[in-house]
Amino acid sequence: GQFLSTTSKFSRQDTPRKAEADILDSTSELTRSDTLSDNLPVLTKAKGHYWYPSNGPKILDACGGAGVACLGHGRRDIIKAAIAQMKDCSYASYAHFKTSPAEELSDWLIESTGGKMQKVYIMCSGSEAMEAALKLAIEYFTWMGQPSRVNIIARDQSYHGTTLGSLSASGHVARREPFRGILLPSRFHHIPACNPYRQRLSLAESDASFVARKAAELEAEFQRLGPTTVAAVVLEPVVGAALGCVPAVPGYLAAMQAVCVRHGALLVLDEVMCGMGRTGTLHAWQSEELEGGGGERLATTVVPDLQTVAKGFAGGYQPASALLVGEKVAGVMRREGKMFTHGHTYQNHPVVAATALKVQRVVEKERLLENVRVQGRLLERLLRERLEGHPNVGDIRGKGLFWGIEFVRDKKTKEPFEPGQQIAQRVQRIAMRDFKVLIYHGQGCAGGGRGDHVMIMPAYNISSKLITEIVERVARAVEEVFR
Ligand code: PLP
């Protein structure tokens, strides 16, 4: 949430000097207010699809904060489940006890993957889950007698979390920059993102050819590092905050997995933002095409070795995340009695688990994944109708209820705005101030800290009427900023 108001401050370090000066200039006030948070409205209530600040009118929630509030706010059924669990058992130390909500939630999650994921660790934030995934990948190879596998390959323009390991994996230049001295560049390596809007050689380049080039980039990185030194490749199936809802090109995940399999490395899918229903299937990897790069038909479906989920997991009613462990790693743990050297005080927290379980039961019972797909199609259609022709809208992309709009100075050349102009931030601010709708904004999607995008991530139980309302308000904010 804090990144909402600080994106451009973060962007200052990864751009050329001129842009750097622009940003420092234009954000000095912002930077001060970040620390004090004194410019933010005070929220007294959130209910349904609206935020209620203490003064001023209600604000339509079109992004669930940071893509979190997947059922809207203040639902009595979920609050009731959380309170009931608190009354029964408000805390249990995971090292001493199992609790029924944590057990039930783990079983439900495993079942939701068709048994492909076999072990679950419940935690409280996406960063914790990613940190655990990275550590488990490394520890797995020590169990396997391959201690030389210490390298992690991730991608540019990615965000995997705010802790040291997860931030080292992140390719988000601006968020890394202040901590450059203590990140782990000798262990974490970055290949280009999968961003067809900016990377296709031409409009005529096929998915298969594009994917083949991407697979070659990963292969080259394995060769550069030495294939037997790589523990894991880390990817978001649909890139959230760092790129603005960019789905992998069909076949991309399968092709990446094929390279991992060839070299014996693990595939880690970060579904912190795009998972738990956001893109229309419960797990984003479940909607992936099976066609590999170069048109070859792959024998395997795309199943991660390790997977993380968070935001929509408990919809913000509790801070919840999880690490899911696939057969390869869980099998070794089971057969050889290996224990992951890891643990948090609040791991498998019973109230977190009971709340997440209730959220997921509601998603199931109300058939909300279907609504995500239906309303997602409407959202895409209306966004295209309303904004595709705008001279400064370069790209509209997404999946399910996860849509991004990228702004450009020049539609033909795709030239981004100067970061100092804070275009995405201005769209977000005008949308909130003048049109009373909350959207998420980010910078850096064009590379090197340049490029502006906003993201629309409504709740899964949103109506067509509110989708129409969101698009209208956002479109008017965009028109207003560029006017
Ligand atoms: N991974 C992804 C893809 C994210 O979007 C985020 C947060 O935005 C994280 C990891 C980190 O999650 P958290 O902020 O809950 O620590």
Image: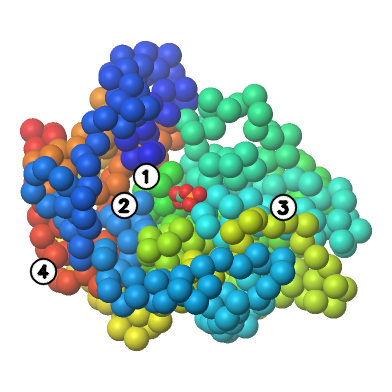
Mark with earlier residue (3, 4): 3
| Local SS, label 2 | helix
- Residue drawn at 76 percent across, 50 percent down: 230
2 and 1 marks in contact (CB < 8 Å): yes
Calculate the distance from the C-alpha at mark 2 to the C-alpha at mark 4.
20 Å
Identify the residue position indicated by label 4 in the image. 465
**In the figure, residue 381 lies in which quadrant?**
bottom left
Residue 283 placement, left or right of 103: left
Mark with earlier residue (2, 1): 1
Q: Which part of the image, by quadrant, shows the N terminus? A: top left
Q: Position of residue 311 (x, y in %)?
A: 43, 59
3 and 2 marks in contact (CB < 8 Å): no
Residue at the limit of the structure toward the right, as seen here: 145
Within 10 Å of disc 1 (Cα), the crowding (few <14, some 14-19, many 20+) is few
Instruction: Look at label 4 and name its amino acid.
Output: Lys
Calculate the distance from the C-alpha at mark 2 to the C-alpha at mark 1.
7 Å
Identify the residue position indicated by label 3 in the image. 135
Calculate the distance from the C-alpha at mark 3 to the C-alpha at mark 1.
26 Å
Mark with earlier residue (3, 2): 2
Instruction: Look at label 1 and name its amino acid.
Output: Gly
Q: Which mark is residue 65?
A: 2
Q: Is residue 52 above or below residue 321?
A: above
- Residue drawn at 79 percent across, 46 percent down: 150
| Residue 395 visible to an observer of this rendering | no
